Image (tube, rainbow, N blue to C red):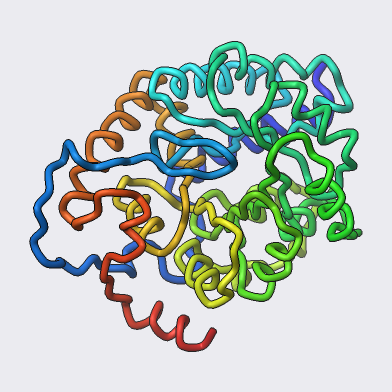
């Protein structure tokens, strides 16, 4: 019999797919279309000369994007994770799993995560827990999938929007402890509300392996939690809260931090990936878009989508005169007026 926690995971999966399919995700701030690429001078170049690798988390990634955390912890999510891992294996992508807290409480749900390592035995896998979990839980989540890294999510907005969510947030000291003691690199990740300069500076001071800005305009967990809550007649209005992914990346530039940035939140095309890399992300990830393709079409359709991205990336990099992913940060760009205004106000 499914537990309350497992049922919540199923509701997350169903609602996330619905909101992406029906294009109901709220829009907060300027998105990727607010950044235009400026043609540069001609360079001696060839598509075959382009290097799409990026170095982060102590590893070389063949592609500067991966399958971001989505699900786990229920019977329905076992098949989803199995399909995602199979696609990741066939396309050579890294992959993160959804929060593993349910499996730490209910061992019957471990298989819904472990299937990812079974289907992607040589892949780079990222475990996932909330920022409040002690080092013992963190190590258990790592061991569960033989993870190469772990992301700890700071999801204050989601918790406050969730009827059964936490109301106490004493995270900073615990994050510092986990980063110091973890057996694998630690990513600190937002889940859809983005990050401003002060938060980025605060988190960077903890010396994580990377920070995932988790910007708005992708999957919105406040929206999901409030749709789940059928009894609350006066939900929190979080519509004005948060920064988009492009705003968060500009905030990273203003903060001038040393921690590598990962961009997720509303990435739906390879052009979005390129724009995020231009704005300083070391790598990028996509969850909701990939989930929507998988759930409304098929695993083969998702594999085709990813291979299309992989074919287009070196061509776009050649167009922009970038032989390496790092070169993209030097590409000239123009900001739409609302994004430039945001940048000026930071």
Residue shown at the point (63%, 70%) measured from the top left: 241
For residue 313, above or below residue 261: above
Give the side of residue 288 with respect to residue 196, left or right: left
Rendered image quadrant of residue 335: bottom left
Q: Report the residue at 39% width, 82% height from top.
A: 340
Residue at the location (78% across, 29% down)?
141
| Rendered view: 178 above or below 244 | above
**Could you tell me residue 239's position as x and y percent?**
60, 68
At 34% across and 58% down in the image, what residue appears?
275
Q: Where residue 251 sits in the image (x, y, percent)?
A: 54, 73
The location of residue 170, given as percent across then percent down, is 90, 60
Q: Nearest the camera: 52 or 141? A: 52
Q: Quadrant of residue 1?
A: top right
Q: Is residue 121 left or right of residue 205?
A: left
Q: So how many labels did they put on this image? A: 0
From this viewpoint, is residue 164 visible?
A: no
């Amino acid at each position: 019999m499914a537990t309350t926690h497992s049922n919540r995971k199923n509701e997350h999966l169903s609602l996330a797919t619905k909101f992406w399919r029906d294009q109901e995700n709220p829009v907060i701030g300027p998105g990727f279309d607010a950044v235009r690429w400026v043609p540069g001078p001609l360079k001696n170049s060839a598509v075959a000369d382009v290097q799409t690798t990026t170095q982060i988390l102590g590893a070389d990634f063949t592609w500067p994007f991966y399958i971001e955390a989505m699900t786990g912890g229920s019977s329905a999510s076992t098949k989803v994770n199995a399909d995602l891992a199979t696609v990741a294996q066939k396309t050579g992508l890294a992959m993160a799993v959804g929060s593993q807290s349910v499996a730490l409480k209910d061992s019957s749900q471990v298989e819904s995560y472990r299937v990812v390592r079974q289907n992607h035995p040589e892949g780079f896998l990222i475990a996932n827990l909330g920022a409040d979990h002690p080092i013992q839980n963190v190590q258990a989540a790592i061991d569960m999938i033989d993870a190469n890294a772990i992301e700890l999510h700071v999801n204050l907005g989601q918790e406050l929007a969730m009827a059964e969510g936490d109301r106490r947030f004493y995270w900073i000291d615990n994050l510092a402890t986990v980063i110091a003691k973890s057996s694998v690199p630690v990513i600190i990740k937002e889940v859809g509300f983005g990050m401003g300069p002060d938060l980025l500076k605060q988190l960077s001071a903890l010396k994580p392996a990377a920070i995932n800005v988790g910007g708005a305009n992708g999957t919105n967990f406040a929206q999901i939690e409030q749709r789940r809550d059928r009894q609350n007649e006066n939900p929190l209005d979080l519509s004005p809260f948060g920064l988009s992914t492009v705003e968060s990346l500009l905030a990273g530039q203003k903060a001038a931090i040393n921690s590598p940035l990962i961009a997720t939140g509303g990435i739906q095309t390879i052009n979005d990936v390129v724009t995020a890399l231009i704005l300083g992300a070391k790598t990028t990830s996509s969850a909701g878009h990939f989930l929507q393709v998988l759930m409304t079409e098929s695993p083969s359709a998702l594999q085709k989508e990813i291979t299309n991205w992989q074919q287009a990336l070196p061509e776009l990099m050649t167009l922009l005169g970038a032989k390496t992913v790092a070169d993209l940060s030097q590409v000239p760009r123009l900001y739409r007026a609302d994004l430039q205004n945001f940048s000026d106000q930071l």
